Amino acid sequence: MPNASRFERLAARDDRWITVSVEGEPVKVRAGDNAATAVLAAGLRPSRTTAVSGAGRAPYCMMGVCFECLLEIDGVENVQGCMTPVRPGMEIRRQQGARHCENNDREEMSA
Ligand code: FES
């Protein structure tokens, strides 16, 4: 992974570990972790870039309030990583800029 993580884990009661993919690399995480934690554990900062300026951002509140943790999870963009529990085989990617909008999305919104 590109940079060292400053993320430290506290002691946990549940010590089962699973493997997810972060930017195509296998990362071991605890079964109760969320996707934003997996990105932090992998040492990947920033975890996304903003849609307007391209500035780097990283998970902040870890409780669903700030939306700084937006990720692409299993091919779905704009997912709040801190609110998404990990599961074996999950594919997580950092979100770069705005999510892509398909024509189908616009048609569904106007219906
Ligand atoms: S880290 Fe704030 S909403 Fe996910």
Image (cartoon, grey):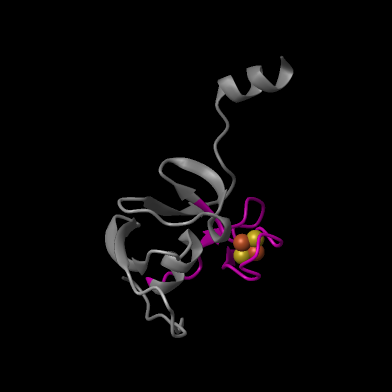
Look at the image and tell me in which quarter the N terminus lies: bottom left
The question of residue 59 being in magenta is answered with yes
Q: Main secondary structure of the magenta part?
A: loop
The question of residue 58 being in magenta is answered with yes
Residue at left offset 71%, top offset 61%: 65
The residue lying toward the viewer, choosing from 49 and 76, is 76
x and y percentages locating residue 72 in the rendered image = 47, 48
Residue at left offset 56%, top offset 42%: 99
The residue lying toward the viewer, choosing from 63 and 106, is 63
Q: Is residue 50 left or right of residue 30?
A: right
Q: Is residue 75 left or right of residue 96?
A: left
Q: Is residue 99 left or right of residue 43?
A: right
Residue at left offset 58%, top offset 32%: 101
x and y percentages locating residue 15 in the rendered image = 35, 74
Q: Tell me: residue 95, above or below residue 58.
A: above
Q: Tell me: residue 75, above or below residue 87.
A: above
Q: Which residues are magenta?
A: 42-71
